[in-house]
Image (spheres, helix red, strand yellow):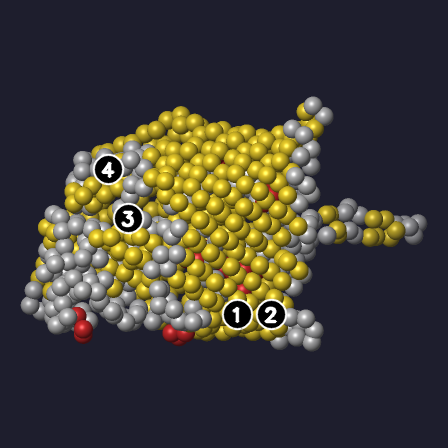
């Protein structure tokens, strides 16, 4: 788009003022399921076809079509990504290519986005973000940690120079309501100072007994053009999530105490009314962009995120009674279960900064691109120590220091058919002691895209990283881990077969520090390995439709695995460095517009384990996801219909460390079959006017019963039954 001003001169001639050109991609933004460029792989602005790795984008339009509110729902529709839950409303491991995702970013900066007891992932609110880039495979060049699974990079909503906004109201199954408003407000007439404000709130119940949730989010983002070449940005972001009725562990027992299978309803949830998990994240951020000329620019970014997390969980479940012995299985007469409990809180602050200088240069008669950068992240986590009491009117159990109640010190439930006894409570009091962990990751990196010939380009990159971690325990004991000068190379090549097709290949090293502790309290040594990928990519309709077929192979060594029943000095599960995992497979993906009215997004992944050393497999061999929307032709042009499916094959999993019991006791793990499933969804949207539309979304259309976890401490977690949501949205 071009904008210009026209004025009358003194002699009556017309004078054309400065022309401002904005490159707005026709397929990006409104009604788009793909993007023109992404920097999430190498730091260079490349189209999906010119990026020598598998890169996926969840656009704003996709999030609105599917009514996506949080990171779990976003990754649920992402090709190649699976989720494995440890409990309801608590820890969720998102996985790709056989490995857990641990590399999270916002606007390219490291972010504590893990969905666990202390991470900020549980509070991530998608109303505050414009899109999500997911890079599958290792990304050691920019992140420093070569996570072999994927890197998730969330892109915030930014202000623009024109006034506008939107608002919506959603009501759905189990009395779920969600409201949101998004306002883009120029603060000066010419738009040089501009702002964007987003607010959102959600409340609702669940298909599970005693469960409800609440979420809030807010964003204030400002930008100021100091000159035609320099832009300054700053903002504040707030995200909050609370789940009442979540538990500590999988909430459905797989076996009765006699070893026979259970068949409990999806609403079963053996938690007390006081069980909850709560996450609150506040972020301040700033940026500076300077354009030296058409080719060279400098980007500087900084952010600080503070996450307060509280876990106050109770659940009647199976757990360790003594070393290697597990009890707490339900009996069919209502006896057998034991209320477990845990209380912990964390205060995590992460400070991140990044400097990038990128541009183009001429050499040997050809134009090339180059990027230099430095990033630094520092994370400080505080965990207070608690004295806790789990009590009823007749019994009382206490712990000092480690506030965890298992099968050996929990409270027996009178009759689990009636739920947890109403008189059972967990109280926690701070002792005044705390532990502190300080982690720092910094590195220098550079990459260049060399145009060797017209069809061939080569990307070369290298990073050198320094990592340090220091923990001071409650007793004052100190443990440290330091890795200096770790070199991570990156090599990629793209060969254009035609205007529409390209062959590509890439290689990078893997280096990932680990936070798990050994029996001595020291950290498990870092993961190392290698990641390879090659394939073919296609691009049609001026980039509005992209597709790829990839073969990948990843070797990961020294991944932490549980050290039997051994514990750390603080009483947590101990780990050792395993022999590692090696996987390979195929990724197939398509995203974009087949016609101006027909969008499609989906993919298929085949995963093969060449070598496996872990605590139980959580990945299907076959994973298929597909979503599509179609705007009907006249006279029904105001109606858009959509459908989709998420399907995965069965998983030969492991119920670990507790397995199938005999006489109410288990002493080892048990192989289990995590059944495959296909979950269908549908949507319809009708434009009441040019500014307002009404949509209906149906998830799990055929009400399939399936599990989002199967075989964790002899427990399972049901997926959502069929649910509906109606949304009224308007723009202005």
Residue at (42% x, 41% y) in the render: 584
Q: Which residue is mark 4?
A: 576
N-term-proximal mark, 1 vs 4: 4
Query: Mark 2 or mark 3, which is nearer the start of the sequence?
Result: 3
* Local SS, label 4: strand
Q: Nearer the viewer, mark 3 or mark 2?
A: 3
**Crowd class of label 4 (few under 14; some 14 to 19; many from 20; radius 10 Å):** some
Q: Position of residue 95 (x, y in %)?
A: 39, 49
> In terms of secondary structure, where does tag 3 sit?
loop
Q: Is residue 414 above or below residue 10?
A: below
Q: Is residue 575 left or right of residue 239?
A: left
Sequence order check: which comes first, mark 1 or mark 2?
2
Residue appearing at x 60%, y 55% in the figure: 592
Looking at the rendered image, the disc whose residue lies closer to the viewer, 3 or 4, is 3
* Percent of width and height locating residue 11: 93, 49
The Cα atoms of the two marked residues, 3 and 2, are separated by 43 Å
- Report, in whole angstroms, how far the alpha carbon at label 1 lies from the one at label 2: 8 Å
Q: Decide: marks 3, 4 in contact (CB < 8 A)?
A: no
Q: Indicate which label's residue lies in the foreground, 1 or 3.
A: 3
Name the residue beneath numbered marker 1.
683
Q: Which residue is mark 3?
A: 616
- Name the residue carrying label 2: 640
Q: Is residue 297 left or right of residue 568?
A: right
User: In the picture provided, is 481 more to the left or to the right than 683?
Assistant: left
């Amino acid at each position: 788009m071009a904008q210009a001003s026209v004025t009358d001169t003194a002699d009556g001639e017309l004078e054309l003022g400065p022309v401002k050109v904005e490159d707005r991609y026709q397929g990006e933004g409104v009604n788009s399921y793909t993007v023109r460029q992404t920097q999430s792989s190498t730091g260079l602005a490349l189209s999906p076809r010119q990026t020598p790795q598998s890169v996926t984008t969840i656009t704003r339009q996709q999030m609105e079509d599917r009514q996506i509110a949080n990171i779990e729902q976003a990754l649920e529709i992402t090709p190649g990504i699976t989720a494995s839950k440890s409990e309801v409303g608590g820890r969720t491991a998102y996985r790709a290519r056989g490995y857990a995702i641990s590399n999270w970013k916002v606007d390219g900066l490291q972010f504590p986005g893990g969905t666990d007891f202390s991470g900020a992932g549980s509070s991530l609110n998608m109303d505050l973000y414009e899109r999500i880039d997911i890079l599958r495979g290792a990304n050691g060049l920019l992140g420093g940690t070569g996570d072999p699974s994927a890197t998730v990079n969330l892109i915030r909503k930014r202000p623009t120079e024109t006034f506008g906004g939107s608002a919506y109201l959603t009501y759905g199954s189990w009395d779920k309501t969600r409201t949101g408003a998004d306002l883009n407000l120029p603060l000066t007439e010419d738009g040089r100072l501009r702002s964007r404000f987003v607010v959102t709130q959600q409340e609702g119940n669940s298909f599970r007994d005693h469960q409800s949730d609440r979420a809030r989010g807010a964003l204030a983002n400002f930008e100021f053009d100091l000159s035609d070449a320099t832009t300054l940005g700053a903002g504040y972001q707030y995200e909050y999530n609370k789940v009442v009725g979540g538990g500590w562990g999988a909430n459905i027992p797989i076996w009765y105490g006699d070893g026979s299978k259970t068949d409990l309803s999806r609403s079963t949830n053996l938690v007390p009314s006081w069980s909850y998990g709560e996450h609150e994240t506040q972020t301040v951020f700033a940026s500076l962009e300077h354009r030296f000329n058409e080719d060279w620019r400098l980007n500087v970014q900084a952010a600080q995120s503070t996450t307060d997390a509280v876990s106050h969980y109770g659940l009647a479940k199976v757990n360790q009674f003594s070393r290697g012995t597990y009890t707490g299985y339900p009996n069919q007469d209502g006896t057998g279960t034991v209320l477990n409990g845990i209380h912990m809180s964390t205060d995590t602050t992460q400070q991140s900064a990044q400097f990038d200088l990128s541009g183009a240069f001429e050499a040997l008669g050809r134009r090339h691109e180059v990027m230099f950068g430095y990033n630094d992240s520092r994370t400080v986590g505080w965990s207070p120590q608690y004295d806790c009491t789990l009590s009823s009117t007749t019994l009382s159990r206490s712990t000092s220091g480690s506030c965890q109640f298992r099968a050996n010190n929990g409270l027996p439930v009178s009759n689990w058919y009636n739920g947890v006894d109403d008189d059972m409570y967990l109280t926690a009091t701070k002792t005044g002691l705390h532990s502190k962990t300080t982690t720092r990751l910094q590195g220098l990196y550079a990459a260049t895209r060399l145009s060797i010939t017209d069809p061939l380009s080569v990307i070369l990159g290298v990073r050198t990283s320094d990592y340090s971690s220091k923990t001071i325990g409650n007793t004052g004991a100190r443990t440290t881990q330091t890795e200096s000068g770790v070199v991570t190379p990156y090599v990629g090549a793209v060969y254009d077969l035609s205007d529409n097709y390209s062959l590509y290949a890439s290689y990078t090293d893997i280096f990932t520090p680990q936070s798990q502790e050994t029996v001595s309290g020291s950290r498990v040594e870092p993961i190392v390995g290698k990641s390879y990928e090659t394939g073919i990519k296609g691009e049609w309709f001026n980039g509005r439709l992209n597709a790829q077929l990839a073969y990948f192979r990843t070797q990961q060594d020294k991944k932490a695995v549980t050290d039997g029943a051994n514990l750390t000095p603080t009483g947590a599960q101990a780990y050792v460095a395993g022999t590692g995992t090696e996987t390979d497979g195929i990724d197939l993906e398509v995203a974009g517009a087949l016609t101006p009215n027909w969008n499609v997004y989906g993919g298929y992944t085949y995963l093969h384990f060449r070598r496996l050393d872990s605590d139980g497999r959580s990945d299907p061999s076959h994973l298929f996801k597909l979503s599509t929307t179609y705007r009907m032709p006249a006279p029904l042009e105001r109606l858009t219909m959509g459908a989709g499916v998420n399907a995965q094959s069965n998983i030969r999993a492991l119920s670990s460390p507790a397995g199938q019991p005999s006489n109410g006791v288990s002493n080892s793990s048990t192989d289990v079959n995590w059944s495959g499933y296909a979950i269908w969804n549908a949507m319809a949207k009708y434009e009441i006017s040019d500014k307002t539309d009404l949509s209906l979304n149906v998830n799990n259309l055929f009400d399939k019963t399936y599990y989002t976890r199967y075989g964790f401490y002899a427990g399972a977690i049901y997926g959502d039954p069929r649910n509906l949501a109606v949304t009224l949205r308007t723009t202005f």
